[in-house]
Amino acid sequence: MKISSVTNFDVIIVGGGSSALFCAAYLSSMSYGASIAIVETNLTLGKKLSMTGNGRCNLSNTNIDKSLYNTDDRYKLNKVLNSFSHINTIDFFENKLGVLTINKDNLIYPATLKSSTVTDGLRYFCKENNVHFILNTRVTDLKKESSERYLLVTANNKTLSAKYVVLATGGASYPKTGSDGRSFALLKNFTQKEDFVKLIPSLVQLKTKNTFPAKLSGTRVRASVSINNSRKEVGELLFTDYGISGILVMQLSGILNRYYASLGAYPVLSADLLPDYSFEDMITLMNSLRDTKIGTRKISMALQGIILSEVVYEVINESEYKSLNSKALCNMNDAEIKRVVSLLKELKFRISGSMGFDNAQVTSGGLKLAQVSDTMELIGTENLYVIGEMLNVDGPCGGYNLQWAWSSAVAAAGGIYGKL
């Protein structure tokens, strides 16, 4: 990997994650004569990218639903995503980077199902197209050298110079990977406080006041979970030592953190642990089981063919009806059967907080999207671009956030290429 001693470049991209690598790759594929450098805090590039999708790297989604993103400028978001869609993403990865892709239930992955394939594909392509890598270097200050160039000061007091600067340092999620939020300070000379939306952890696990999840730690069930009976997610619910996790929980976490954390109180989450059965279906089923030999079993074991017995036991045990755990189904009256069904289909999770930025997959908030042009150029500041997670755009699990990284990177690359 090339470590450059050159201090003057046409383009400097600050950050070495997904949007930074893609911007460098795309720009270098168009402008062979421009000198481009990536300046990265870590010793390696793509550290956070290599962790995505549980190490498989969910590149994009064939059904990108723009309405599911959180942002302050939906019109601009739609325009950028439409300009470089999942189809363009597949084409670039396969025909430029040599990284074949597969589609699994609308989720697009590298054919190898290894995120290292994506990271290496981008890294090798950049190297082959003469992109300079300046590693183990944190940029601590950014200012105008003249009307034509920017100065970037590093932590070891070295100075870099470029005509075009792209900030792609990520948000504040997984701070151990380098995206700890400090790089937003690089915009201090060019923005106002009101240009930013508060940083919030999103796609993150939730803590609960309920104690039974800890007793079920590691147990998974199919469930539906909703906020105030409005926004609902269906999928796998994971019980943990601290509360609850699973994709359906993480999908709701951003909404909870954005709208309720600042109030100091979270709403109660409603969970249905039997989402494939209506309330009436469960009553009928339990009544029919009550008249068989299965009905002679205690309630948790009588339902073990429908839902895990340990889940039934712990949910009942934490309720005011814990005495029902000692009863056989055949000895329960109609009111008691309805109580059991209610506990399982109308379970309440009392949320106390989230697991924070250390565990969040994505940062919600950042520089308002309205503060940049369609090419991601900071409005009012020529030749300074902001892309990826630094902008106030975040989406659900399923390739949405990486697609934003690719699309915003291409928008900036195209804007720079048009000026070079």
Image: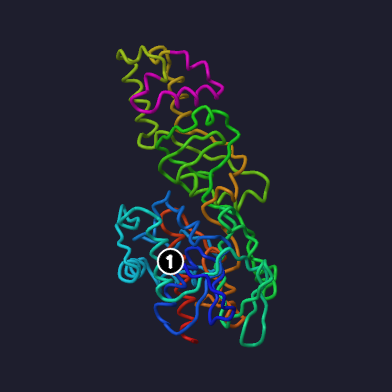
What's drawn in magenta, residue-wise?
301-327
Determine whether 307 is above or below 88 in the image: above
Is 141 positioned to the left or the right of 349 in the image? Answer: right
On screen, residue 186 versus residue 248, left or right, reads right
Can you say whether 270 is above or below 216 in the image?
below
Give percent across and percent down for residue 163.
57, 83
341 and 372: which one is in front? 372
Residue 179 locus on image (x, y percent): 58, 59
Which residue is drawn at the image coordinates 61% and 80% (left, top)? 161
Q: Nearer the viewer, residue 321 or 4?
A: 4
Is 387 inside the magenta-drawn segment? no
The residue labelled by disc 1 is 123
Query: Where, by quadrant of the figure, is residue 306 drawn?
Result: top left
Which quadrant holds residue 120? bottom left
* Tally of numbered tags: 1
**102 relative to 151 in the view: left or right:** left
Scheme of image coloration: rainbow
Displayed quadrant of residue 248:
top left
The image position of residue 81, as x and y in percent, is 43, 69
* Residue name at image x 58 percent, y 53 percent: 176
Disc 1: CA contacts within 10 A as few (<14), some (14-19) or many (>=20): many
SS for tag 1?
helix
**Above or below for 360 versus 138:** above
Give the percent coordinates (x, y) of residue 50: 45, 55
Amino acid type at circle 1 is Arg
